[in-house]
Amino acid sequence: MLQNTSNLTETLSKVLPKDEAAMYLYLLNKAPKKASDIAKDLSLARPIAYKVLERLIEKELVIKHKKPGGVTIYNPQHPANLKAYIDGKAREVETQQAVFDASLPSLVSEFHTRFGGIPGFRIILGTEGLHELYDDVLNEGKDILLIRSPKDHGTLELRELVLKQIAAQVALGIRTKAITPLRPVIDPDILAADKRNLVERRVVPEGVLAVPAQIIIYANKVGITAYGDSLMTTIIENPAIHETFEILFNYIWQKAEPDHNVIIVEMER
């Protein structure tokens, strides 16, 4: 009979679930045994005992066979099987460690690309970044300040994304104050469209504010999307930065009013 079973159970529990370790050692002491006896002696519900036995069988640590009369009994496999199982798990861990070590530089690079290693700071490349920014604007549900880039309609995909976002914001009652550069062709019904879209706009001469990056100021955040050969969106959640951009926006908004009034008069002629 095994001595210090509790110590052995504790040791085996480092490589096996505790119920499996206890059952294996129990069978070393008591086998052969029926499942009903195992469940009773280990104070387990019979369905639980069967599940533990099946897991041990899969690991080749327990074997079952039927005695004459159809009674199924269970015996432990040789402890050498247990060593083989533990050695196999150790090799799995080594392999996983090697795979993780090889992947770690990419994971670190991705983390710093997306978050800059700083809480409240995210950088996302491609249209995924715009999707993430726009979804965040909708989730926050707050009115926004927008300094629009004339490049936000650079492709059909971007145009459709912008139009879909406008519709979603209107549905949530999100209002927009937008500073936008004058485009070569402006829809004469832009003011009516703005009213439908909950937009208050300042139009400025294109050469004055043809910014290559769009700025959205919302909630306690600032989202900046840089257009070019590739898209890059930065989302910053910081009270001081948010307030700074808000102050700058309001200053531009006030200074843009004379130019805006001249442009609107010319549009309405």
Image (cartoon, rainbow, N blue to C red):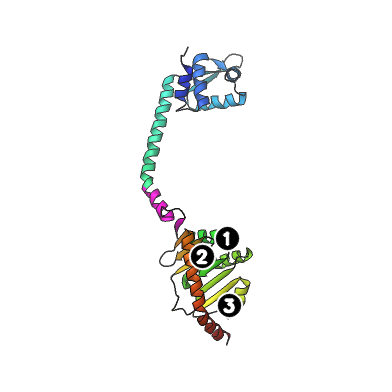
- Front residue of 191 and 22: 191
x, y (%) of residue 90?
A: 39, 31
Who's the residue at 57% across and 60% down the image?
138
Mark 3: secondary structure: helix
x, y (%) of residue 92?
A: 41, 34
- Front residue of 71 and 117: 117
Q: Is residue 237 above or below residue 152?
A: above
Q: Verify whether residue 110 appears in magenta.
A: yes
| Label 3 vs 1, first from the N-terminus | 1
Mark 2: secondary structure: strand
The label number, if any, that marks residue 138 in the structure image: 1
x, y (%) of residue 233?
A: 45, 62
Q: Badge 2, how many Cα within 10 Å: few under 14, some, many 20+?
A: many
Who's the residue at 62% across and 77% down the image?
192
x, y (%) of residue 109?
A: 38, 52
What's the residue type where badge 2 is placed? Ile
| Label 3 vs 2, first from the N-terminus | 3
Q: Which residues are magenta?
A: 105-124
